[in-house]
Structures are given as structure tokens and as C-alpha cells.
Image: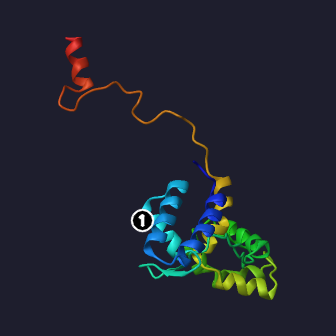
Amino acid sequence: MEFDLMTRRKITQKFAQSYQKAPSRKAKSLILDEFTHLTGYNRSYASWLLRNTGKRVRLSSGVILVGDPKPRPRGHRRPTYGPQVLEPLKKIWAIMDFPCGRRLKAILPQIIPKLEAFGEIELEPETRELLMRISASTIDRGLAPERQTMQLKPRSRTKPGTLLPDRSLSGPSLIGMRGRQAS
């Protein structure tokens, strides 16, 4: 039988409770047989799953898993650099003739006061502070959609060299062949 993920999690939860409370190895073996038959899991994986459901498990990489089959909602962080930072960044990027994030990060502390002095940009103090501490990789991620819109579209769909006739490297060149045909 084929079950969806949520059904398998519920089945695992039910079987894990009885498996962990089983009084003997024989009882655990019977529960494990029924569980593997029902879910189609490998016996070794099924026993690990039933043993560790609801427990904290330390893996070799240092990661601690809680073997709980319930899905947990992920927490979402508010973006640090919102539109109030990205809009001036795009303008500075365009003024500086579209450098990469690493070069733009290096020039931001010198260029922001000059652009403000000449009236090119107006920044609030908190936006100015965020622009001063933004990392190069964050700059690249923030400007990626702009770069996509500015990319040139390819003109041809043919691959290079597909229109040339096939020839081997060891044979005579095309020029040499033409010379022979002429004589």
C-alpha cells in the first residue's frame, strides 16, 4: 500500500508508542513486522524510526533531531534590508556604473557622503547606517533582479560550430582542398 506523508506520520506515531512500551523483544519484533508490512519501510529504518520517535537524536554532524513526526511551523525573520535600503542602493549602483557587490561595498563609505552633498540621494540616518554595514553578498542578492532585467537576450539559438562542415584534424584543411580542386 502507498500512503501519503501525513498518514505515514500518524501510523508511525501510533506504532512508536506501542513499540516503546513493549515488554519484550518478541513483542517488539511482532510490532516491527506489522509496521514494515504496512508502510513498506526497510526493517532497519523502521526500527530506528520507532525507537527514536519523540526523542532527541544526535547525528554525527552535530545536528540534533527530534524524532517527532509532527510538522513544525518555520519562523520567518523580517528582512533587514527592505525597499527603503534597496532603492537608494540601486540608484548608487547605477551612478557608479553597475559594479559588482564587492566593489560597491568597498566604495559605499566614500561615495554616500559625496552623493548626499551633491543632492543625488537623500537618506534617513537609519537607512544610511544600514547601507554602511550591508555585506557584499547581500548587495549581490538585492541587485540580482535588476541585473536580470538588464541582461542582453541571446540572438541566436544555434550552437557555435554547428554550421561548419565536419572535418577531422588529421585530414587536409579546407583551403588545401580548394587548392587541389582548382588545379
- Observer-nearest of 172 and 35: 35
Q: Which residue is mark 1?
A: 44
Image quadrant in which you'd find residue 125: bottom right
Q: Amino acid at mark 1?
A: Ser
Question: Residue 82 location in percent, x, y?
Answer: 76, 74
For residue 170, which quarter of the picture?
top left
Q: Secondary structure at mark 1?
A: helix
Please provide percent x and percent y for residue 59: 45, 78
Residue placed most toward the observer, 41 or 36: 36
Residue 48 against residue 43 in the figure, above or below = below
Residue at the image position 65 percent from the left and 85 percent from the top: 133
168 vs 96, left or right, is: left
Coordinates of residue 134 in the picture (x, y in percent)? 65, 80
Q: Is residue 1 above or below residue 125?
A: above
Q: Which quarter shows the C terminus?
A: top left
Q: Residue at x 52, y 65 (%)?
A: 31
